[in-house]
Amino acid sequence: MNRENIGIIGAGAIGSILAAYLGKAGHEVHVVDIKEDIVDAINELGIKISGVMELHSIVSKAVTSFAQLDELGPDYIFICVKAYVLPAILEDLCSLDNSKRAFVSFQNGLGILKLLGNCLHNENLFRAVVNYAGIPTRPGHIQATFFHPPNYIGCNEDAGPETIDIAKKISSFLTDAGLETEFTREIKKMVWQKTILNSALMPTSVLTRLSMNKIMSIPETREIIEEHIQECLDVAEAEGYVYEKDFKEKAVRYLSTAGEHKTSMLLDFEAGNPIELDFLNARIQEYAEKHGISCRQNKLMLSLIKGLLHHRQATKNAGNKTKK
């Protein structure tokens, strides 16, 4: 096995699990995160993963700045922050030498490659669909909640043979490390597929505060998910992404096995963080309006969540005024 020099941006659940597996496999792994307590914990004790995955791994180094990461010279950089963080770090990404390095996007949602393409060379830019998740429980420790392999990786449709070979190489060393990953020439279709599932399930979880399996076990909320998936499928088809006839039934069965845990959007909402709405339901709605599709349920969910966000911000502002 070749020992690769790998950089990982973001030490949340997705990035930490990735770092732990690659570090355990013997690769040189460098992690960057702005939270000093996480960086200190990783440097001192490594990363511990428990739950549906069990491992403890030491990584080469954790740092707090892109400049430090750049000096460490990784050949592959995995971008593992949430989609809503990307606009804030684009300038930092632009500061990295990206003439030869491979950059792999691990974000949820639509329009990610277009956004990253503003500062990264398209021939060095790769897109992944990640099918594992977890919850940070303390600095350097992640509770893994599920892994439904494989993950997928691909590149721009006009990519040349060299870029495709790099994508295949990445899928190979990820798989060898224990995170089964397949190369696909239809990565955009795979991204749409996951976006459809997330757009149906995540807003419902925020509005109901229910875990995934609870949502799917209640007939009324399950029906909401089914109708929402169908709307999103109609939009995807208008964009040229057609799935098998029984896709909705398979999707509902898949979501029904998700388990007794909250979606990442609900966790972010409860923590007072931004949420990925703009890259999921809002982007679906943009495509729906482009094609003249009503997509009424998606629009309703989008409006209700935005109402909740407005209320949360107003409450926060009122609290700040009271403190003053």
Image (cartoon, rainbow, N blue to C red):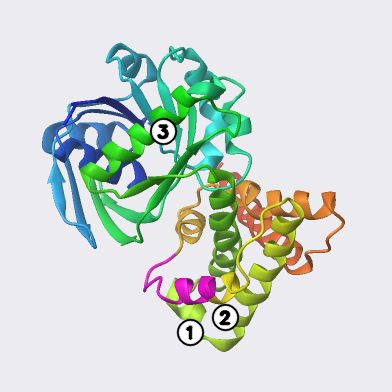
Disc 2 target residue:
222
Note whether 242 is above or below 21 in the view shown.
below
**Residue at the disc numbered 3:** 167
- Would you say 124 lies left or right of 116 here? left
Above-or-below relation of 138 to 158 = below
Which circle's residue, 2 or 3, is located before the other in the chain? Answer: 3
Residue most toward the bottom? 219
Q: Residue shown at 47%/13% (left/top)?
A: 95
Label 2: which secondary element: helix
Q: Compute the Cα span from label 2 to label 1.
A: 7 Å
- Please identify, in this view, whether the residue under mark 1 or under mark 3 is nearer the observer: 3
Q: Which residues are magenta?
A: 250-262
User: Can see residue 10?
Assistant: no
Give the quarter of the image for residue 206: bottom right
Q: Position of residue 250 (x, y in %)?
A: 51, 73
Q: How far across and how far down the image is residue 80, in percent?
A: 41, 38
Under mark 2, the amino acid is: Arg
Rendering coords of residue 176 (x, y %) = 22, 43
